[in-house]
Amino acid sequence: MAVGCEIRKWVVVCVVVLVVNLRHIGAQGQPQVPCYFIFGDSLVDNGNNNNIASLAKANYMPYGIDFPRGPTGRFSNGKTTVDVISELLGLGDIPPYATARGRDILRGVNYASAAAGIRDETGRQLGGRISMNGQVNNYKNTVSQIVNILGNESSAANYLSKCIFSLGLGSNDYLNNYFMPNNYPTSRQFTPEQYADVLIQQYSQQIRPLYNFGARKLALIGVGQIGCSPNALAQNSPDGRTCVQRFNNANQLFNDRLKSLVDNLNNNLPNARFIYINAYGIFQDLISNPASFGFRVTNAGCCGVGRNMGQITCLPLQTPCANRNAFLFWDAFHPGEAANIIIGRRSYSAQSASDAYPIDIRRLAQL
Ligand SMILES: *[C@@H]1O[C@H](CO)[C@@H](O)[C@H](O)[C@H]1NC(C)=O
């Protein structure tokens, strides 16, 4: 009898503790929008390449060494920029398309795939990947599931109109296409200006079906300074420190057109709001004043091989640098968590007038 009371008392205590904890979680992360859909490449992939036959994978240690769940497929020691944005939106972890099931998709889905580009052939030399066209098809599949869950198309359209969409592609169309003349003919077919034009043209055709399938709040993330990655420095910078201007100039041509595309889409797609995130400019800030952001090393990866630790990406079970937050780059191509936190925060809440155009993600969410 006494034992029974004791047990019952504990059950009551446990239930009370559980309820208080759940309340606490709710209050902490009151979502600002119901959902967040992510399109992109290895900068934001969170596991879609894990079961694809590809050289572009990161589901092994020490990737994820600072991530609570360890290696997940993220190309970072910890969080990616979209993890940071998602947290600030109050949504928490967004599932990768590869494993998202059931009602989980109502919080959003991450379609990003390492090595993917706007062009279908981009990244082919690395193996399988889900190009932007494939990601758009996967999104359409998600929408039909959402229609089933919510009952009809108009409820689904109303729901999706409140969600944030972020798109960050283009880096691989340079890195794993245009600037790889032995594998791809594009640099012989197009001048850098023409190539930026064809990429933006194709991108805008991929964005239209997202709009037709409900997207109304879209953030287009520009490409960063590919010419400053440890890999670019290792292969093309005489002093291993001066960024490769030819790469960065091409990236700027793309970004200028992407920003114009935002105006164009805002003028032509009723009830949609597009914004541009100036990842290039934010990155420029980090690389020009590294010390003020706590970085000591900007030209070498924390984990990698060879010159600038930039010849290839971080190998399985390799020991990374000790002070990971002091390195802008985690590996040959990808910024580490410390940089991703700054880039993610400034995308969400602009700290300089040029970070986001015409508004930042925080205000996009409030519309
Ligand atoms: C769609 O479903 C909602 C919620 O169940 C309902 O209120 C609405 O009338 C439905 N609309 C149509 C067009 O069937």
Image (tube, rainbow, N blue to C red):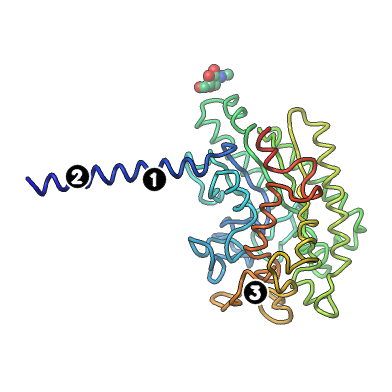
The vertical placement of 79 against 214, above or below, is: below
Q: Is residue 228 left or right of residue 18?
A: right
Rendered position, 269 above or below 289: above
Residue where numbered disc 1 is placed:
21
Numbered tag placed on residue 167 in the rendering: none
Badge 3: residue crowd in 10 Å (few <14, some 14–19, many ≥20) = many
Q: Nearer the viewer, residue 136 or 314?
A: 314
Q: Residue 126: x and y, percent?
A: 68, 66
CA neighbours of label 1 inside 10 A, class few (<14), some (14 to 19), many (20+): few
Amino acid type, residue under disc 2 in the picture: Lys
The answer to whether 184 appears left or right of 133 in the picture is right
- The residue indicated by pointer 2 is 9
Q: Is mark 2 within 8 Å of ligand 1?
A: no
The residue at 59%/31% (across/down) is 159
Q: Which mark is residue 302?
A: 3
Please state the quadrant of the image where ligand 1 appears.
top right
- Which residue: 64% across, 63% down? 338
* Left or right of 350, for residue 51: left
Q: Secondary structure at mark 2?
A: helix
Q: Earlier in the sequence, mark 3 or mark 2?
A: 2
